[in-house]
Every structure is written in C-alpha cells, then in structure tokens.
Image: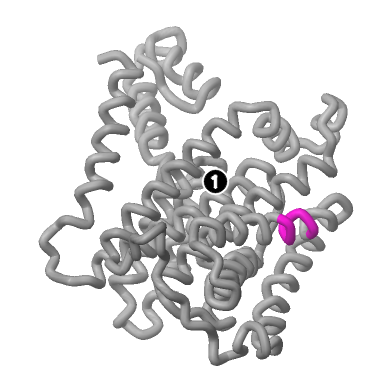
Amino acid sequence: MPKWLGSYWVTAGVAILALLLPLLPTGSSYFSYMLNLTIIYCIAALGLNLLIGIAGQISLGHAAFMAIGAYSSSLLITKLHVPFLVALPAAAICSGAIGFLMGLPATRLHGPYLALATISFGTALPEMLSRWESVTGGHAGIIVPKPQIGPLILRSDLSLYYLNLVILVFLMWFAANLLRSRYGRSWQSLRESETAAQSMGVNLSLAKTSAFALSAVYAGIAGSLYAHLVGFISPVDFNAFMSSQLLAMIVVGGLASIGGSITGAAALTLLLALLSRSRGWSLIVEGVLVIVTVWFLPGGLVSIGRSLLQWRARGRSRGGHGPAGPASAVRKEVSRHGIARS
C-alpha cells in the first residue's frame, strides 16, 4: 500500500473514531465531560509544544494564559453581554497580547532565568485575579453560562464536544501549515541554535515574541472553552499544578510533534481521571510516567513506532552476515535517519 494511502486511512479512521466516541453507550455524562476536557487540554498542550518543542523557549507558568482567556471570555459575556462567537476570539487576542509582552523578556533571558520569569508570572496572575474582586469576583469566582451561537444554546456536553472538536481540528491544521511556512522554519532554527538562526537572517526578537504570542493564543482559546464547559471559574483553577500538567503532557506525548501534543494530553487527562478517586495516586502515577518516558522514550509516546523499528534493526544487525552484509546496511540507515528502511 502506498505511504500516502496508508496515512489517509489512518487519518480517516481517527476522524471517524473521534466523531463516534461520545455516542458510546457508557450511560454516564461524566464520560462526555472528560472527552471535552481532553480536547481542551489538547489545545493548550498543542500551543505549549509550539513554544517549547518547536521554538525551544521555556514556559513553566502556561496556565496563566488559560486564566486570561477564561476570564476575558467570561467577563465579556457576563458583564458586557458580548456574543460567544465574539468573546472567544477576543479572549484569544487578549491572551496573545499578554503572551507577546511575556516574550519580550525572552529576547534577553535564557535558560533558568527565563524559566524563573515564567514561573513568577504563572504564580502572580492567579493572586492578582483573586485580589481584583470588583471585576473577577475574587475567590468567589464567576458563574459562566453555556455558549450560545445565534439562537442555539449549547447546553449538552455532546454539543460542546463537537464544537470543541471542530476548533481543535482547525488549530491542528493551522499549526501543521505554520510549521511548513517560513515562520515555522525560523522557530525550528531558533531551537537548534540562536547564533545560526541569526546568521541565516532570522529576527530573534520577532521569532521569540511571536512564538510566545501564538502559544498564548492557543492557551487563551483553551481557557475560554474550559470556562464554558465547567460553568464556573476561580483563580485556584489555574494554578502551578495545571502548568506542570501541561508540561508533562507534551513531554509524555512527544516534543516538537503535533501528534505528540494530542497523544500526551489525551493519555494524561484520561489516566488522571481514572485515578481521581485514589487520593494522592494521580500525582505519583504522573511523576512515574514522566520519568519512565524521559528515560526510555525521549521522543515521547509518538516515537514508539520508530523505537520498535530501531530495536528490530538492532536485532537484525546481531544476526547479520558480517560488517559488509545486510545488517551493516540497516545499521548505517538507522544511524543516518533514525529509522530502518527496508
């Protein structure tokens, strides 16, 4: 079967599965809720992977951008009675603007200094939201209505699922095309070497700030959808634990990979949901999973297929016919491309 035809059938199968998944006879609304939550985390993780995995920048307080999107959308709808279809992109713009400003220190800060700056931002923002009680309601939070598109109010989790799924698919398509563009290539060169990227004509300041801005846009959209799904938000929802979860998702799934973002977010969200009733075990399992992934699968869960091919190639090399035989050729191909080709 041709390679393109195989990928087409895989994509079609995944799309059909995603469409039919909420229709399974589980008999529980919690299942539909978790599917929605998984999609929302997929969007946030995808944005964070663009920043860390593709552009090579660090953000350890990414939940703050979700908070900006959630509060922007909620306040526009509850206070100013703005339609949902206007509030959602407005929340994305607000988050993107703050992300652009956060990207300015990245032009001068590197490594642990940038990490410390993002942690400080992620810690300070929820505290600011809790103290700004006249607008945000403080710890009492905000009750968020279900999204309304024209005369249609999306009250059920099923209708929210298809809305969130459409948004996720669009953002995945946008990210895939962006990575093939000049901007995506400039981010990848920035990740490999800032000196080399600058020598090739990449504007480092623009590349870093744009990466932070776009990552924040994704987080802002995720935050807005999260607020409308849960129906209530408060500053404690967007704490350091959520930021660490997002980071764990892209590490477990696979850095610099769109599929890795989706895989990691889905795996961790559903796994933690299964362990939600086991007090304390969810954090233990998450930590163990991250350690095992970093140790045995540095490329994340999406690299399992490539790792199996490499293992198979090494097995062939042990049973080969000497240095000039087929095993030697396989070994050279693996060392050059990372996968074995028959």
Depicted 258 relative to depicted 52: above or below: above
Residue 333 belongs to the span the image colors magenta: no
Q: In which quarter of the image is residue 302?
A: top left
Q: Where is residue 227 in the image (x, y as percent from the top left)?
A: 48, 71
The residue under label 1 is 255
Q: Which residue is drawn at 85% across and 50% down?
A: 107
Depicted 194 relative to depicted 334: above or below: below
Foreground of the two, 73 or 250: 73
Residue 126 in sight here: yes
Number of numbered discs visible in the structure rendering:
1
Q: Position of residue 196 (x, y in %)?
A: 82, 30
Q: Which residue type carries mark 1?
A: Leu
Residue 100 belongs to the span the image colors magenta: yes
Judge left or right: residue 55 versus residue 178.
Answer: right
Judge left or right: residue 22 versus residue 163.
Answer: left
Looking at the image, the residue that sits furthest to the top is 324
Q: Which residue is drawn at 46% across and 45% down?
A: 260
Q: Which residue is drawn at 73% across and 45% down?
A: 210
Question: If the image is split into quadrants, where does the N terminus sit?
Answer: top left
Q: Where is residue 48 in the image (x, y as percent from the top left)?
A: 59, 53
Judge left or right: residue 102 versus residue 166.
Answer: right
Foreground of the two, 327 or 64: 64
Judge left or right: residue 337 versus residue 153.
Answer: right
**Numbered range of the magenta stretch:** 97-101
